[in-house]
Amino acid sequence: MKSSTTLNGVVVEAPKRPEGSPLAGVKHVIAVGSGKGGVGKSTTAVNLAIALQKLGAKVGLMDADIYGPSVPTLLGREKVEPTQRSDGKVNIPEINGIKVMSMALLGDSPVVWRGPMASKAVTQFLGECDWGELDYLIVDMPPGTGDVQITLSQAARLSGAIIVMTPQVLAKDIAKRGLKMFQQVRVPIIGLVENMSEYLCPSCGHSSHIFSQGGGEAVSKELHAPMLGSIPLDPSLVEEGDEGRPVLLSRPDSKVAKVFLEIAQNMANELNDLVHGDRQVPPQILSIEPNEKARMSKIMWTDGVQSLIAFKDFRFLCPCAVCVDENTGERKIKKDDVADDIYPASVRTVGNYAVQVKWSDGHDTGIYSYEYLRKCLTASK
């Protein structure tokens, strides 16, 4: 099997998988997630899969929403079900030419499981199902940032993740939490998709922004995640989803269908840049964990780097006007001026670019930008 995927001239290298891996024939596993439900994540995952298929790729679609599976319905549920082979593997059925696995294909009874059971089901979907050779396996994630998301991120060796959001202010904050969850488990963010970006009148075609405007662009700039596309709110899209008629099949020439094709192509472009290191994303802080016994703080960065800095050095590096002369840049305080028993009483993030520390000596005016702190820590090595 070739180790790369070519889509409209874009060549994307596949991540290396261990020999004998159940997903050895799958070049790219892409998670489609969101911080909350109701943003059109599943609709986006289904139509993204079809768009990739239309662009010439071999595609599979895994419904990882164990408690609320909807992919088979959205894709056009046929009377198909998985079958188990003599070797214990499961043959995956196809719907509209796309391999599909979902709890909805295994019966209509509600799933009443605790988190570990749901995680086990996802692991079985990955390891016991025969996905064959695919260019892309699109995974429709459950909403939120729980057990299933972590399990999938660890087990599937994801090529990247796509975050679906809506334009509202509340949706922005939730989308950022979902995005940071993937960053914490070292999954690259391919980009954002803003759903319901504008309302399209079915009669005259006029568009209006009924949910707010610019939410996706704001998150994109703040977290350095590319916008893959904005999907308009088309009433027909909802009806077609309920009836199992994806817009790319029912109305391939519509504006919405063309948007999904653009998103699929943009995803391939961004994935290509990620794989080849052409996308430069400034490292950001994921967490700062103080260790009172060692009198040091451990800093986790989004690029996987871990930094250690002594409390005393951390306090000494404060960049505020009290500690540094604004005109000359010279430090006003000396290392000996900092108490040996200093410690951070609290640490809070400022926007998505800095942290503010309140120290045990009462000093709290210093705002350490990520860029400044990373530069200091790198220089000290």
Image (cartoon, grey):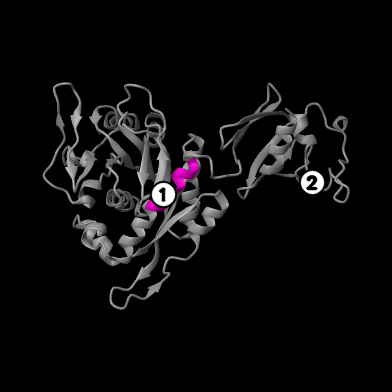
Residue lying furthest bottom in this view?
Answer: 204
Horizontal side of 321 relative to 225 (left or right) equals: right
Is residue 285 inside the magenta stretch?
Answer: no
How far from the left and from the top, in percent, is residue 287?
59, 36
- Give percent across and percent down for residue 98: 22, 44
How many discs appear? 2
Q: Nearer the viewer, residue 56 or 329?
A: 56
Task: Say above or below: 96 vs 241.
Answer: above
Furthest toward the left, the residue is 79
Foreground label between 2 and 1: 1
What residue is shown at x 77% (from left), y 35% (from top)? 315
Residue found 27% across the figure and 61% down from its top: 238
In the figure, is residue 56 to the left or right of 159?
left
Q: Amino acid at mark 1?
A: Met
Q: Quadrant of residue 40?
A: bottom left
Residue indicated by mark 2: 320
Secondary structure under the numbered disc 1 in the rendered image: helix
Residue at figure coordinates x 28%, y 50% from the top left: 46
Amino acid residing under circle 2:
Cys
Q: Quadrant of residue 144?
A: top left
Q: Position of residue 297 (x, y in %)?
A: 67, 30
The residue identified by callout 1 is 267
Instruction: Inspect this view and state whether residue 16 appears.
Output: yes
- The span picked out in magenta is 265-274
